[in-house]
Image (cartoon, rainbow, N blue to C red):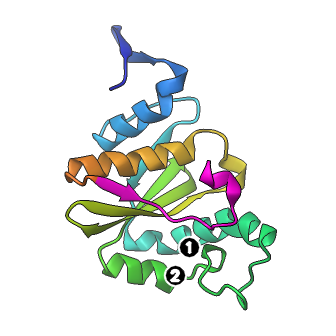
């Protein structure tokens, strides 16, 4: 639930939302099919096959800093997301994994995937936000979008995996 204050004028409508709730509100409104204008207007949509090269690039670039930090290379960690290939995304889509693409204006800047593993369970995968777009709530909006989609499908549990040594993610 998000508290909001609506104002209608002759030529437009405004919705005022507490800043702490903005990511959740934008995610819920865009998931419901509404267009939301913000200073950094973001939209999350289902990715299609034509988006595969863009998704691959987003995932590779968003995970490059993690790969550098943990010294992951294509030789010692060929399956790490910093080495993502188009065929990985295509294979995932063929298995029914749904990718969501986040755009800020017209610029793709993040993505996430949702795998419906069992009737009561889905996996949140491939969460990625380009470094220059981090700390703007986009990752949070993507996660909340997956939660919203899971609720719509009556999924009771969402799971995510992390690198065990990445202590900051274990808080």
Q: Are circles 1 and 2 on residues that touch, CB within 8 Å?
A: yes
Image location (x, y in percent) of residue 73: 74, 83
Q: Mark on residue 28?
A: none
Above or below residue 158? Residue 105 is above
Q: Residue at x 64, y 71 (%)?
A: 60
Q: Work out whether 78 lies above or below 97.
A: below
Count all numbered tags in the image, as a single digit.
Answer: 2
How much space separates mark 1 and mark 2, taking CA atoms? 6 Å
SS category of the residue bearing label 2:
helix
Q: Residue 171: where, in percent of width, then height?
A: 62, 47
Q: Is residue 155 visible?
A: yes
- Is there any visible trace of residue 12 in the rendered image? no
Crowd tier of the residue under label 2, counting other residues whose Cα lies within 10 Å: few below 14, some 14–19, many 20 or above:
some
Q: In the image, is residue 161 part of the stretch drawn in magenta?
A: yes
The quadrant in which the N terminus is found is top left
Give left or right: position of 102 versus 46: right
Q: Which residue is mark 1?
A: 56
Which residue does the numbered mark 2 point to in the structure image? 86
Residue drawn at x 38%, y 64% is 123
Q: Residues within 10 Å of mark 1 (few under 14, many from 20)?
A: many
Q: Work out whether residue 7 or residue 97 is closer to the camera in this orientation and state it.
A: 97
Q: Is residue 18 left or right of residue 72?
A: left
Q: Which residues are magenta?
A: 157-171
Which percent across, then down, holds residue 147?
36, 48
Mark 1 or 2, nearer chain start: 1
Label 1 residue SS: helix
User: Horizontally, is 94 left or right of 106 in the view?
Assistant: left
Residue located at (24% from left, 54% from top): 155
Q: Nearer the viewer, residue 16 or 68?
A: 68
At which x and y percent is residue 28? 35, 37
Residue 141 among magenta residues: no
């Amino acid at each position: 639930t998000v508290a909001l204050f609506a104002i209608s004028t002759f030529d437009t409508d405004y919705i005022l939302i507490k800043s702490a709730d903005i990511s959740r509100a934008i995610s819920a409104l865009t998931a419901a099919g509404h267009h939301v204008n913000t200073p950094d207007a973001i939209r999350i949509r289902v990715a299609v096959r034509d988006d595969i090269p863009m998704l691959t690039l987003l995932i590779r670039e968003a995970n490059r800093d993690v790969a550098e930090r943990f010294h992951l290379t294509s030789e010692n960690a060929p399956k790490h997301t910093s080495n993502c290939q188009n065929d990985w995304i295509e294979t995932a889509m063929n298995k029914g994994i749904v990718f969501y693409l986040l755009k800020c204006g017209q610029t793709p800047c993040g993505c996430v995937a949702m795998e419906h593993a069992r009737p009561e369970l889905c996996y949140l995968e491939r969460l990625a936000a380009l470094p220059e777009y981090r700390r703007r709530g986009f990752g949070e909006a993507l996660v909340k979008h997956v939660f919203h989609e899971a609720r719509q499908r009556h999924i009771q549990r969402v799971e995510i995996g992390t690198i065990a040594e990445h202590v900051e993610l274990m808080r």
